[in-house]
Amino acid sequence: MAQPLPRPRVRVPAAAALQGPVQDHDILLLHGVELGEEVGNGAYAEVRKASVPCAAKILHDVLARTPLFPGRHNERREPRNRFAQECRVLWSCTHPNIVRFYGMSSHPETGRTVLLMELMTETLTAFLEVRHKCTAVPYYLQLNISHNIASGVRYLHSRGIVHRDLSSNNVLLSSPPQFTAKISDFGVSLLKDGQKESSLTHTRCPGTPVYMPPEALMPGSVPNPTEKMDSFQMGVLMLQIATKLFPYPTKDFTKRDENVLSYKVVPEWKRRESHIEILRKVEHPLLDHPILECLENREDKRPSAELILEQLSALMGDKRYLENCEKAGVLPRKPAEEENTDKGLRILKETVSALREENESLRDLLEREKEMAERERGRNLADRNRLQQEAQGRQALQAEQGRVRTLEYELQCLRAQQVGDKDNLQGQERLCTQLQQRMVSVEEENKRLRQIHSQQESEIRTLGQRRNDQLVQYNSQLVQQLEHQTRLQTAQAQECERLKQQLQQQAIARTALAQENERLAQQLAHYNGQLQEQIRASTALALENEQLTKQVERLRANQSLFQEPRCHVVAFPKKPTTVGRSCTIKLEACDLAGNPGLLSQNDPISAFLVGSTPNPIQCTVATHEKSFEISFTPTHSGRYSLAVRLGRARPQEKLAFLCVYPDPECPLTPRAFIGTRERPLKKPCSLTINNRREVLVCEQTGNLVSVFDIANPQRMKRMIGEGRVDQPTGVAVDNETGDVYVTSRHKLQKFSGETGDLLNQVGHEARERNDEGGDANDEFRYPHSVTCHRGEVFVADQKNGRVQVFNANLAYLRTVAHGDSNSFNDPSDVAFDEHGRMYVAEYGAGKIQVFSAQQGNEKQGKCLQTINRNECDMKPSSIHVVNDHLYVSDLKRSVVDVFCTSGEFVRSLGCRGYGEGEWYVPQGIASAEGKIFVCGSEDGHVHII
């Protein structure tokens, strides 16, 4: 025979199932539910999976069999009471952030009561310690989970319920990626019913101690549970979510007895100072509002759940939350108004769905009732057939009794005929004996049938009465349930109508708020305009006041200056000053207007040179009637400025600048080389130095750029452009991006400084234009060098006689022009000094042109001067500017000429490569860390001096 289907859901009083304090509530009782594997276990109950998609919570067997003694508190009775309290609270709550309660069932083996609840994925503890053990919890998840907890607590408080045991073990999360948080475990919650408060747990510390507020752990009287206790626990939970650190007990908890932990009066923020410091370092938005507010020791200073929810909703609208959601690829939560609207629609949909489910349940219930009625009708028909058979037996008995009476009558007739029929007397006597025996047996059979009939009648009456009572009771239950469902449907219809009205009111309120916001925005714009005008007026007044103040200070300074003697330079040495050679500067005393004046013999005159040496150079002063001379002998080369004090007046600084050059007779002493005689470089023609202390050497016949370390110049670190450049002529580095630019034949190429990959290039191959290159703006005939300056790339095209300028992505910008023909005479190199002045070397003209720094929208600066050596011809191939000195590689004489940036010749370095360690055919020049690097193109070395 097929197994019977599980009985439909019915509503029975919860007290009948729990034998506990839960009363006046109807709980869904489900039968035929099978239990599966265990998913959790606690001190009072275990949780298993059920055959339907839900979680089954079962009280432990030992605690479930403990009898209840009203009015007496014992530790085994408390779990039963907590179990009943959780059932009562769950049945009274319906919220997206409260674990959903489906109903009750019974254990198929032990008969223990089972709570059927929504099946969640994991606890908040497992989420923090397992899922995010090695990774930080994203900011948007921290805010979403905290918002879910606050929303659930706000709902509980609106229903008059205080949870009192909010911890990471009692917060459950759904499956990713939503991770919706829901509150569970209402065993120690406090339920307010009218004016009477009902709480299962009357101990002083009913929840988890490390999450409890100070007033719940203080020794003494039992505290009055309030909603601010949940606010404190929410603060501890949000701090745990943000730091992933469990609030383990510290020395601030002290054991006093077996059951109670006493609490030292220490602020929670001080006890959790190390955790809070972590959030303070990263400026976490949750720290000040609402975490620290929730952790206040005084209840009246803690915010309510409503205020906490508003603060979290405000944080969910800021830029950091939206950027974090966009980075994680998730949609941010909707604003509060849209969320309330969606919530109302969702409640309407859930209500309609619940009504449909209830109607289906009632329809199934009625069909079952019809089946049961049919079965009862079948049983009544069988009873009726049996009664008919018994009636037929009684009729047969009555017929047999009639035959007996007929026989008696015949017997009387035979006795009357005994006198006349003597011959048949013996036969009649035998017949009488047989008739008497037959009458005795018939009487016994009648007696037995009467007893059977009386028993059957009593059984039929008892069975009918029982059936009638059961049908009456069952029909009354059905009527009550139908009435209850009718009331529920009516209440739900009223609630739906109320929600619709609320939604309409909210829509009207939003329209009014939008209009009010528009009006306020117009007022704000008007006020801003007025404020801007006032600010401009006040700014103008402040500027005028500042100008007046400066004028007053200037007048005061000028007044003091009129009282001080001054001096100015009259004669300056014509020849360059070198180390060890005496030098004299003539000065003249004057007043503020520059008129010559007399020197006071009583006021001493002091002078000294301030420059590159640590100590100033003292000078000898010779005084005349209206002038005085300063003499000195420099001991170190460098740039110096003159400072003079006349009497007690303030010293005049930087009256004159002079450059002291090294002794021309000092021999060249190379310090080191890049490249060796055993393994020379392949015709190094250009070099540059980046900000990573690396020297990049352009090897012309090697068709690559070699990278060396300044600290170890003999070790090559890497190669750039190998197999991609053809006879490179120049190299430059953009120190901001680290990219490397190389000129080779008729192209300008851009490489990555890290990987050496080719990023971009301009120009054409020589074979495409018969080795003549191109004349377009982005083409070259013979690019001799490349220079980077302020994000721009300068290329000296020697055969085209021009300097072309590109941006960092090698897009053409402009061409630097010069002279009437707007071209240079074989430009070979371009350099810049610290002031932005541009130096262009003209190989064909044997000179260097100096241009001023580019100003504003100017395409190029103005030509300031020309630097050359009049006494000899010069073929400048490469130039380099450092410390107000210009270094020029002269290919004609194989030397490096040193000039001052003002144009004075200082000295020459090298002597045509004849000396030991000197270069031959110098081309590229660079400097770093007080060293000069020179490429010896023909000897295969980079000389360091």
Image: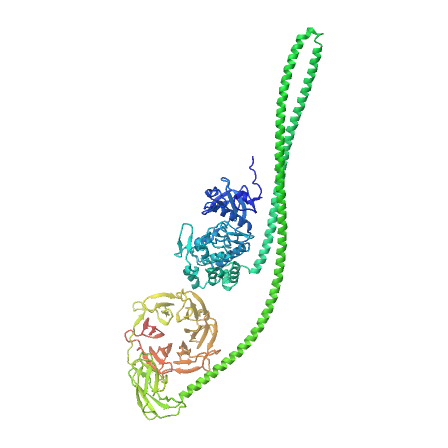
> Looking at the picture, how far across and down is residue 906, in whole percent?
33, 81
Q: Which quadrant holds residue 702?
A: bottom left
Against 327, residue 370 (above or below) is above
Tell me, yes or no, if residue 47 can be seen here: no
Provide residue 492's location: percent of width, then percent of height.
62, 51
* Image point (31%, 71%), residue name: 673
Residue 905, position as x, y percentages in the image: 35, 82
Question: In which quarter of the view is residue 770 placed?
Answer: bottom left
Closest to the observer, 404 or 846? 404
Q: Is residue 295 left or right of residue 629?
A: right
Q: Say whether residue 596 is left or right of residue 236.
A: left
Residue 634 vs residue 336, the one in the foreground:
336
Quarter holding the C terminus is bottom left
Residue at figure coordinates x 28%, y 83% from the top left:
580
Quarter residue 653 falls in: bottom left
Q: Is residue 526 left or right of residue 66?
A: right
The residue shown at (70%, 17%) is 406
Of all residues, the one furthest to the top in this rendering is 423
Q: Position of residue 679 (x, y in %)?
A: 31, 67
Q: Can I make out residue 802 in this image? A: yes
Q: Is residue 373 above or below residue 389?
A: below
